[in-house]
Image (spheres, rainbow, N blue to C red):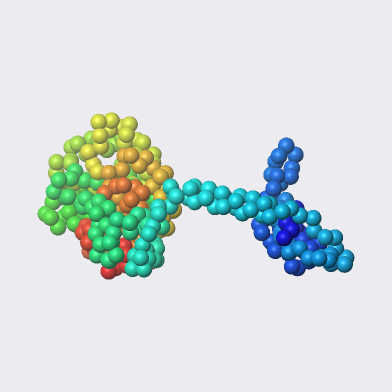
Amino acid sequence: MKIKKFVGGSFKEALETVKKELGSDAIILSSKSVKTGPFGMLNKDAVEVTVALEETDGPVHDSREKASGTDISELLKEIKGLREEVCYLKDTLRPIVPTLRVGKDKKGLFNLLLKQGVDTQFAMILLERSQETLDSLKNSIKGDLKIQGLLPAEENGLIFLGPPGVGKTTTISKVAHMIASKRRPVNLISLDADRIGSIANMKELSQQLRCPFRVVRRVSELPKIIYKEMTKGPMLIDTPGAEFDNILEDIKDIFPSGFPVKKCFLIDSSMNVSSALKSWQSCKTDMIDSIGFTKLDMATHYGSIYNISMLTSRPLSFITTGPGVPNDIRVPTGDFLAGLIIGGI
């Protein structure tokens, strides 16, 4: 067997040279990019192809030269090099992708998680900790989720933060009705003074619940209101979506000893994970106390709830399941949320 290497500007070009010189009986052993530029620089257009051809007594072809080659040791060297590359790739990927050894039943659960939008690596880790049953998987998911709830009897209130359109004003209406149903007075405050529609909704809500409503333009106006009124009931504070990072910065400066109201970041559950995380990471995440998922009725699957819960590592206060006020909100149990994540089971 004769071994020969050909170099071309592309794989196709090198292959044409092989066929022209050795004919169609040549066997391609490997191909790789080679350093052909000056000072050992890699020219991406240069490809080296290693081929083998069985030796014959006569010439390869009347119009072709006989292939000049090396002995079998060259082939063994090439195979050894390929094996080393494969081993290197395996060692590189092993820390990134956990080793998963599962039977047929677990592979079915793995596919279920992926179908529901659970991140691949999270799915692998979940299945490594689970038995080959759906109940075991649900218990693993449930154990990872932190559900804090609203705890209205113990809270001074909440300030709602999040990107535009996530549903802050609507969520405030739902939470206000939930607190009012416990026979507790509510104080409504809006920092979103420039949005006429938001202010109108908040005014209507205050009339329905017969509770005070104030509009302020700056965080610096909050201390005199909060410390005076919070003994009368929880504060629910609306904020403009485009300025949540600036508001958190102001809160940090104006309340150096700590903000007395819980800071809740709202996440649209119908958004893809990358978009949701981009919003989350654009704010001072160390200041956020809890998260809430909105618009579950618009989501096509719920694996992102698990992904984002893990990536933010914040407890969940509530989920909203539609536009209706006051009913489309709930503090879910771990069983409910785990079942939702794997497909409503």
Q: Position of residue 227 (x, y in %)?
A: 19, 36
* Near-viewer residue (165 or 21): 21
* Near-viewer residue (284 or 210): 284
Q: How many marks?
A: 0
Q: Residue at x 27, y 66 (%)?
A: 133
* Near-viewer residue (122 or 211): 122
Q: Residue furthest front?
A: 57
Q: Residue at x 21, y 59 (%)?
A: 333
Residue 30 relative to residue 14: left or right: left
Q: Position of residue 186 (x, y in %)?
A: 18, 49
The C terminus lies in which quarter of the figure? bottom left
Q: Residue at x 19, y 57 (%)?
A: 178
Residue 229 relative to residue 202: left or right: left
Choose top left, top right, bottom left or bottom right for residue 127: bottom left
* Near-viewer residue (32 or 161): 32
Q: Residue furthest left?
A: 183
Residue 125 visible somewhere in the drawing: yes
Q: Position of residue 151 (x, y in %)?
A: 17, 50
Q: Position of residue 150 (x, y in %)?
A: 20, 51
Question: 259 above or below 136?
Answer: above
Q: Residue at x 72, y 60 (%)?
A: 1
Question: 38 above or below 140?
Answer: above
Residue 297 visible somewhere in the drawing: no
